[in-house]
Amino acid sequence: MKQVFLFSAACLAVTGCAGVDMNNIIPSPPHLREAPAAPAVAPNAPPANATTVDEFDTASEGEKVAALSAAPTPAGALGTTVANLGDPTVPGFWVETPLVTSVTEGRVQSKSTGRTVKVTLKPTTTGGSRISISALQLLDLDLSGLHELVVFGS
């Protein structure tokens, strides 16, 4: 113990005591160290090595049925927007659009297919809209295109 103290004192003298982290000089034993925090992963997030549409579309059959099921009459159309595929690593049924100013529940309807899906509407400040891969699949729309959608609030 005497040797550790003398070593520590010598290190402090050499460094001038400025910004010295003693854990870097004399690290704690492995059994006392904290385990590194695991990276936060969203529930239903696609695997890190996902490459196909089916791997990115992590919505369960139950979630898909719920998103297609009849909902209370929407408050009305908020407007029409043109959307493309959003971040495929973000799971769920959502649309980022400048037509809302806060996160809210709603629906979108494809002008080309006529299909409607329940989504979470998220605000964005960019000019265009982005839609989740799961919502695009239920609307029966191509992943690579621009799609005209009618957005309804709830």
Image (tube, rainbow, N blue to C red):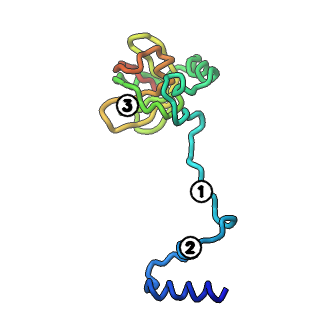
Mark on residue 23?
A: 2
| Mark 3 surroundings: few (<14), some (14-19) or many (≥20) residues within 10 A | many
Q: Nearer the viewer, mark 1 or mark 3?
A: 1
At label 2, counting other C-alpha atoms closer than 10 Å, the crowd grade (few under 14, some 14-19, many 20 or more) is few
Image mark count: 3
The residue type indicated by label 3 comes to: Leu
Q: Secondary structure at mark 1?
A: loop
Judged from this view, the residue extending furthest toward the front is 3
Secondary structure category for the residue under label 2:
helix
Kindly report which numbered mark, 3 or 2, lies closer to the viewer in this rendering: 2
Closer to the chain start, of discs 3 and 2, is 2
> x, y percentage for residue 59?
58, 26
In front: 60, or 22? Answer: 22
The mark nearer the N terminus, 1 or 2, is 2
Q: Position of residue 9 (x, y in %)?
A: 54, 88
Contact between marks 3 and 2 (CB within 8 A): the answer is no
The residues bearing labels 3 and 2 have C-alpha atoms spaced at a distance of 52 Å
Residue 42 location (% of width, % of height): 56, 40
Tell me the quarter of the image containing the N terminus. Answer: bottom right
Residue at x 44% of width, y 29% of height? 95
- Marks 1 and 2 close (CB-CB < 8 Å): no
Q: Residues within 10 Å of mark 1 (few under 14, many from 20)?
A: few
Marked residue nearer the N-terminal end (1 or 3):
1
Q: CA distance from mark 1 to mark 3?
A: 41 Å
Amino acid type at mark 1 = Pro
Where does label 1 land, which residue?
Answer: 36
Q: Does residue 154 appear in this view?
A: no
Asked which secondary structure carries label 3, the reply is: loop
Query: Hey, which quadrant is residue 101 in on the image?
Result: top left
Q: Which residue is mark 3?
A: 99
Q: Amino acid at mark 2?
A: Asn
C-alpha separation, residue under disc 1 versus residue under disc 2: 16 Å
